Structure formats: structure tokens, C-alpha cells
Image (cartoon, rainbow, N blue to C red):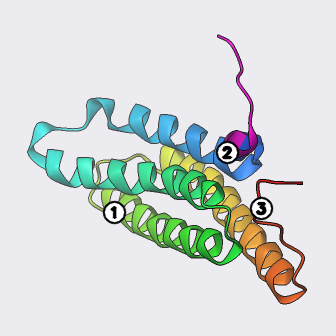
């Protein structure tokens, strides 16, 4: 696969985006053997997980620090939704404790990374240290 690079694809270098991709793959793996009867809940949970990486990428590509921060906050909201859903599946007996623990470890790392990225962006906004121009 050819790696194409430009300013708009820089989100792929972000650790949080890479971790969000890995978490999405992990959650997909968890759901392989879930019963069809909870398919709607399963799909809503996958959508929340998918939303995290999409919002990181979309916010980055907006080039505006304030919009980027807004999308990171939406991603954090999706993180909360995902966590709540997986806790529910665990409590309902659909998910073994050891799988839940592995999920929780990955999720916690991603969530904290998103919080740190948002804090860093807030500092850049406060210090007016953000260039949203495509020109040099």
C-alpha cells in the first residue's frame, strides 16, 4: 500500500487516532460471537466506537483549533457512550471479565490520550499558538 501524505492526513500520525483504530478492531472482535437478539445494541456500540476515530480525523482536518477541540470533545462523548455500553454487556453476562479488563485498559489509555490532546489544544488556543493556514 502506498502511503500518501499531505497536511490533511496528518491525523494518521496521532497516537490517539491509531489507538482508536485498534480499539475499534478489538471491539469488533468482541462482538463476533454475540447473539443476534442484541444486534441493535451491538451496532450502536460499534457506532460509538467508530465515532471516536472519525471525530479525531474530522476535527484535525478542519484546520481550526476551536473546531478541532469541539470534535475531540464529541469523540470523548463517544468514548463515554462506548464505555457505558461495554459495562452493560459485561454486567449482563455477555462479556467475560478478562475481556472486559482488556477493553477497559485500552479504552482508559485512549480516553486519557484524548483528554491530554484536548488540554494541549486548549493551551495552544489560549496562547494563540495555532496556525490554521495552508500557506507558509
The residue to which callout 1 is attached is 91
SS at circle 3: loop
Whether residue 127 is situated above or below residue 53 in the rendered picture: below
Q: Residue drawn at (34%, 51%), measured in percent from left and top?
A: 47
Q: Quadrant of residue 91?
A: bottom left
Q: Residue drawn at (70%, 52%), measured in percent from left and top?
A: 16
Whether residue 84 is situated above or below residue 40 in the rendered picture: below
Q: Which of pointers 3 and 2 indicates the residue nearer the eye? A: 3
Q: Which of pointers 1 and 2 indicates the residue nearer the eye? A: 2
Asked if the magenta segment contains residue 4, the reply would be yes
The residue to which callout 3 is attached is 133
Q: Earlier in the sequence, mark 3 or mark 2?
A: 2
The residue to which callout 2 is attached is 8
For the N terminus, the quadrant is top right
Label of residue 52 in the image: none
Q: Residue most toward the top?
A: 1
Which residue is nearer to you in this view: 82 or 90?
A: 82
SS at circle 2: helix
Mark 3: few/some/many CA within 10 Å (<14, 14-19, 20+): few
Badges 1 and 3: C-beta atoms under 8 Å apart?
Answer: no
- Relative image position of residue 5 (x, y in whole percent): 74, 30
The span picked out in magenta is 1-9
Which residue is nearer to you in this view: 60 or 48?
A: 60
Q: Quadrant of residue 131?
A: bottom right
Gap between marks 1 and 2 measured at Cα:
41 Å
Amino acid at each position: 500500500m502506498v502511503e500518501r501524505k499531505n497536511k490533511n492526513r496528518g491525523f494518521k500520525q496521532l497516537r490517539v487516532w491509531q489507538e482508536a483504530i485498534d480499539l475499534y478492531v478489538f471491539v469488533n472482535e468482541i462482538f463476533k460471537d454475540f447473539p443476534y437478539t442484541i444486534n441493535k445494541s451491538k451496532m450502536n456500540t460499534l457506532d460509538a466506537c467508530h465515532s471516536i476515530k472519525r471525530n479525531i480525523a474530522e476535527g484535525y482536518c478542519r484546520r481550526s483549533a476551536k473546531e478541532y477541540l469541539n470534535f475531540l470533545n464529541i469523540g470523548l462523548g463517544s468514548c463515554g457512550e462506548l464505555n457505558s455500553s461495554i459495562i452493560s454487556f459485561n454486567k449482563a453476562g455477555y462479556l467475560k471479565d478478562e475481556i472486559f479488563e482488556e477493553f477497559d485498559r485500552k479504552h482508559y489509555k485512549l480516553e486519557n490520550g484524548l483528554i491530554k490532546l484536548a488540554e494541549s489544544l486548549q493551551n495552544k488556543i489560549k496562547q494563540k499558538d495555532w496556525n490554521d493556514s495552508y500557506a507558509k
